[in-house]
Amino acid sequence: MAEKITPRGVDYSQWYIDIVLNAKLADYSPVKGCMVIRPRGYAIWERIQAEMDRRFKETGHQNAYFPLLIPMSFLKKEAEHVEGFAPELAVVTIGGGEELDEPLVVRPTSETIIWSMYKNWIQSYRDLPLLYNQWANVMRWEKRTRLFLRTAEFLWQEGHTAHETEAEAVEETMKMLEVYRDVVERHLCLPVIAGRKSEAEKFAGAVATYSIEAMMQDKKALQAGTSHFLGQNFGKAFDVQFQTRDGKLDYAWATSWGTSTRLIGAVIMTHSDDKGLVLPPSLAPDQAVIVPIYKNDTKAAVLAYGEKILADLKAAGVRAIFDTDDTQSPGWKFAQHEMNGVPLRIEIGPRDLEAGKAMVARRDTGEKAPIEAVALGAAARELLDAIQKNLYDRARAFREANTKVVSDRAELLAFYGADQGEDAGTAGATGGFAEGLWCGGRDCEAALKAEAKVTIRCLPLDRQEGVSGKCCLCGAAARHRAIFARAY
Amino acid sequence: MAEKITPRGVDYSQWYIDIVLNAKLADYSPVKGCMVIRPRGYAIWERIQAEMDRRFKETGHQNAYFPLLIPMSFLKKEAEHVEGFAPELAVVTIGGGEELDEPLVVRPTSETIIWSMYKNWIQSYRDLPLLYNQWANVMRWEKRTRLFLRTAEFLWQEGHTAHETEAEAVEETMKMLEVYRDVVERHLCLPVIAGRKSEAEKFAGAVATYSIEAMMQDKKALQAGTSHFLGQNFGKAFDVQFQTRDGKLDYAWATSWGTSTRLIGAVIMTHSDDKGLVLPPSLAPDQAVIVPIYKNDTKAAVLAYGEKILADLKAAGVRAIFDTDDTQSPGWKFAQHEMNGVPLRIEIGPRDLEAGKAMVARRDTGEKAPIEAVALGAAARELLDAIQKNLYDRARAFREANTKVVSDRAELLAFYGADQGEDAGTAGATGGFAEGLWCGGRDCEAALKAEAKVTIRCLPLDRQEGVSGKCCLCGAAARHRAIFARAY
């Protein structure tokens, strides 16, 4: 039997976990904080990987692979970097039965090991740029974990580039942010806001961090990808000097950028409903499932009809399956495939066969309509495109309905139900994204976080022109427009 | 300048390392025994991965991902398994700043963590088979390492399947061995001998291990892939019982199988020459390079001609590049692309332009011939196919020329130059694969290894019929035909 899942309205966190477990996307492992990605979840990751990887290569990047283990001393070469990552490290102290002279950390991110190699590979401006990416596992020893969203080990890609000039590195940083935005919006159907992080929220060791921020159905923000301009911080820390075009020496300029299996969590949280997983057709391992309905005397004919439809769908480029398991009822199968997020269900029974039709149900809206069998391939393709578009539009409308422009502190706190004190909870308040002016002050931001668990998600890139007025937090002169939210 | 490489005849080991470093396939890292796979090496791995992955999926397997870290106690549940891997473990003892209650090992292979999960997923015969594969990094703390061939960390795929019956698991074991054989022979152009390992050489925890064995140019064997029938060993160790079709309880039957980045080392060692890397066209990131030859007055015309040829090659499905760098001479470029293993070089100068031709050189044989420009796309495709075939045929002929049937111990030792005592080296002896009868005795095998560093590589599957006669080592009644060799 398909398991019941907790409705979103009852317990949003439990709803999410129920979907992950019941759709068999991931499972808890016996190693604290580490997850197992099951085949149905991994297939989604493979589709995300393929699209990202294609885009990285189109923009001139190459894949490479650097060691999992990093000498502890390397992390310490960049002061902010080690400060940021030290509390989350897993450390290897024994190798081949002997205590190691120097402990090795399991990479939490690879800037240090990669820049230690770049030192050997970069002597002249002719060696630049290096545009490398790595698909890898990384480890951050988190106390509170949640499947896909925050786990001790996760899978990701990390781009690490080295450039001749500051301008080139900044251009690269923005280019990859845009690649992320485009892939995540088109392919994952997650509308995002691209912006710069505040100083408090930026990557440990970066000059500037940029991110794309999505809104989940509980109106919390989720950071879906980051791109960092690292300046010459790692070039200096690892002494990566090169001969410039005019014969001088300079340190190489750096960027890094990453997206991870966390994106799977974002997809689940954004699109799914109380029946289970909802997936963008571009990510769905199975895009359409044919469910036959028959009695003994009609079985052979209906199955033959289904085979014909299956072949037509495949010929039309639809990833279709035919569920011929006769130990389960059609109703059970409907529920199961809804749980699994198959975008289209195609029901065929004796009457459909007679009429030369099939009943087609959309997973996203639940709408059902009969469609001529001869037109099914083309119709399925159109419906899949429509679902892809609808998921994006629906998520975008949800975000817009839950975004509020705020002008002062009281309004901001009321939006999050934090005007009654922290313990009052969010009863009556809607929450979401608050857009407000900000003075740029670190204290201002820290006070808000302490009081209401609300942080600045980003300073949206396309909304910084003509900023004037007062900071919505402290009333001082504003320097930025900011997006505030509670966040994963 | 392209670096010179040590000739094979002078120092085979150094020749190999020179190619790996100068063709920029991999580099040493600051972490002892761990390598960096550079983009040119990783691109080869991506092509191997793509072909393997396609074949795994065609045979019904799905990818998943299991944790990097494994509780030490899990390894101990299978006695032979822990005995085999304990000396090579890297151990995490600190996480998040605190000493761990139980040390976690960085996976040397994943049978234990995977079977601990299978226990949760397998209750009934209806849950079987589970046909899972994982692409991952693993770690074995080796004392002596060599780029690609033996490194502390390497990349691989590991298949782990669970079955209802012994027969099914055995069938799976043999099926995947055959997938390996086919991919490695067709795609990597490595002729291999498929066979069963002796008890002494089998995987720690297996009932039977099968491997494919290739011969390198120094006549040593290299194990290119293994497939293990694990019986119920892990099913019992992790208590994975299921309800059978007739309502009883039984332990699940297991297989595992793996290939790794070691294959890249095998490709390099098998096909390359004293000019550098030689690659099968199927694996070459760039299959053809166009090198223009011009003076100032002919530059524009030759470059335009090259662009046209580049477009034609791409249209014909050839991965072609056009080397227009004018800071380097054509001769330097010839050497560089030979070093990098580009299968076809297409030289174009003013006279070629006039004649409507191009000079095409094969990397494998060095043969050069002028080809009509209009026919170049089709001709390049044919030449690439011919190179792919030639590399396999050449390697197979080399193996056959260096395989000797031996009938007794004296003949075997003489073949390896070990008849003068171990220190006499191999002067005068040819070495290679010796094919001989074997009694199956463990002592017999151990004595040979100790005396001559020669081991039984496998008992070839297709040569076991009608075995009769005496063991070539001890003279007792023979039970198997065996392939002997020194090995990587």
Image (cartoon, coloured by chain):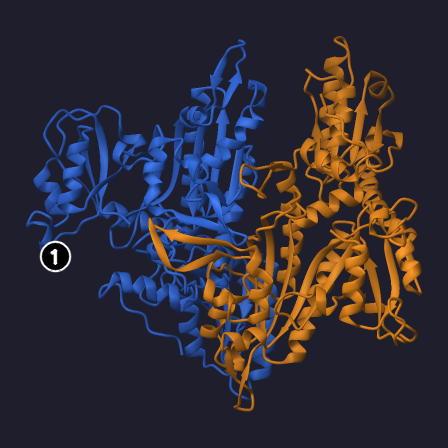
Chain colours: A orange, B blue
Q: Which residue is drawn at 55% across and 34% down?
A: B61
Question: Which image quarter holds the N terminus of chain B?
Answer: bottom left
The number of numbered discs placed on residues in the rendered structure image is 1
| Residue A287 in the image, given as x and y percentages of width and height | 74, 37
Label 1 marks a residue whose chain is B
Q: In this view, does B316 lie above or below A290?
A: below
| Residue A484 in the image, given as x and y percentages of width and height | 83, 60
Q: Which of B41 and B162 is in front in this view?
A: B162
Q: Nearer the viewer, residue A285 or B250?
A: B250
Q: In this view, does A198 lie to the left or right of B276?
A: right
Q: Quadrant of residue B363?
A: bottom left
Q: In this view, does A63 lie above or below B136?
A: below
Q: Residue at x 27, y 61 (%)?
A: B13
Q: Nearer the viewer, residue A61 or A169?
A: A169
Label 1 neighbour load within 10 Å: few <14, some 14-19, many 20+: few
Inspect this view and state whether residue A348 appears: yes
| Residue A229 in the image, given as x and y percentages of width and height | 66, 71
- Residue, disc 1: B427
Q: Is residue B139 left or right of residue A136?
A: left
Residue that extends furthest to the left in the rendered view of this protein: B420
Q: Which of B444 and B105 is in front in this view?
A: B105
Q: Which amino acid does label 1 sit on?
A: Ala
Q: Is residue A286 above or below residue B368?
A: above
Inspect this view and state whether residue A405 appears: no
Q: Residue at x 87, y 59 (%)?
A: A434
Q: Which residue is drawn at 45% across and 64% down?
A: B342
Q: Quadrant of residue A268?
A: top right
Q: Is mark 1 on a helix, strand or loop?
A: loop
Q: Is residue A313 left or right of residue B483?
A: right
